[in-house]
Image (tube, rainbow, N blue to C red):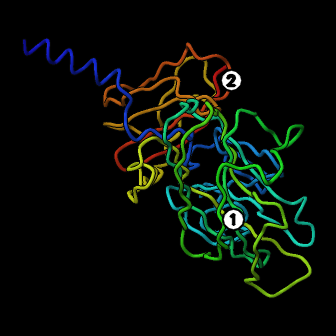
Amino acid sequence: MKQSFLILLLFFCLVLPVGGQNLVPNGSFEDYIDCPFGLDDMQAVGWSSSRGSCDYYNSCNNDILDCGVGVPCNVFGYQMAYDGQGYVGFIQYRVPDPETLREQMTCSLIEPLVIGETYFFSMRINRGNSVFNINASNGQGFLLTNEQYNAIDNPSPAFEEYTYVNQEILTDSTNWISISTSFVAEEAFSQLVLGAFLETAMLDTASVGVPLPYGQAYYFIDDVRLSTDSNFVFTEVLEQHERLPLGINIFPNPNEGFFRLSQKLNTGSIIIKKITGEVIKRFEIENELTEYECSELSSGNYIVTVMTDKTIDHLKLIKQ
């Protein structure tokens, strides 16, 4: 009888949905294809620019002298990540041509929304405070859609189309501000667009620097969450992305079917993902295990995350 109960309990654990699932892949922008080299280089796994050329920032590029796309120092401000080591940025509007210089980014949700289900959304946002960012505005938001947009030949729709938009002018360049909402899904949307919304006539703006004939309102985004679990979306507790990099490397790389770690670890996990963010293989690190087999992978590039209870490293794996 006791055995039957345990089997039944295991069945429900496997079948019932797990609370706290984030439908946004790589929502804290920790996983990257390559360390960003400069602006307009969207290297966050699973994300791409769908209007303009959004930017990716990570502490892996932390040249203090250059201050390009590092964290916390970069060309558009000095800001620690809200969660982990990376975040993204976009132009909300730019003077004197606000109609053309507006940016948006997009990703495919981990699974489509369920019609009639209530969802909760939140993201952290912060205004860039460099000498270029002399303006602030409202109009930051998101759009749920089934269209797969890209900035090259299918840009995101006109700015008045959105699921939610912030109506308050965001001037804070010190603290990460939470933008959050809830809604009932009217369609089984599979795509998310973030960034600049509202037509220019609807924008409320403010000057936060020396008035110039040119300038922009630029914002950073981090910790994007979309879930049916309100407690998960609105929690203030940081997730595993607080872990610091250990400096692990994998070799040989490229490889033909196996790889090793450059440091011996007693416990932890190794997660292999496609460039799109899809998890395809997972290893539990064991002290005596020195080789990890990946011969079943197709030739190409993958993201390998090596994670312990206190550290996390994101690496590029090339399978020949």
Q: Earlier in the sequence, mark 1 or mark 2?
A: 1
Q: Is residue 50 above or below residue 135?
A: above
In the drawing, does residue 281 fall left or right of residue 68? left
Q: Which residue is mark 2?
A: 300
User: In this view of the protein, which residue sits in the foreground, 214 or 120?
Assistant: 120
Of helix, strand and loop, which one carries label 1?
Answer: strand
Look at label 1 and name its amino acid. Answer: Tyr
* Placement of 56 over or under 138, stated as above or below: above
**Residue drawn where x is 68% and y is 23% of the image:** 300
Can residue 251 be seen from the camera position used here? no
In the picture of the structure, the residue carrying the numbered disc 1 is 219
Q: Residue at x 70, y 60 (%)?
A: 69
Residue 153 in percent (x, y) is at 89, 37
Task: Locate residue 186, reporting x and y percent.
Answer: 61, 36
Asked if 314 appears above or below 90 in the picture, the reply is above
**Element carrying mark 2:** strand
Residue 306 rendering spot, x and y as whole percentages: 46, 38
Percent position of residue 160, x then y:
78, 54
Q: Residue at x 63, y 72 (%)?
A: 78
Task: Please say if the residues under marks 1 and 2 sit with CB atoms less than 8 Å apart.
Answer: no
**Mark seen at residue 291:** none
Identity of the residue drawn at 88% across and 65% down: 98
Compared across the picture, whether 318 is left or right of 15 comes to: right
Residue 44 sits in quarter: top right
State which quarter of the image contains the C terminus.
top right
Residue 161 in sight: yes
Q: Quadrant of residue 139?
A: bottom right
| 132 vs 154, nearest the viewer | 154
Task: Indicate the quadrant containing the N terminus: top left, top right, bottom left or bottom right.
Answer: top left
Amino acid type of the residue tagged 2 in the rendering: Gly
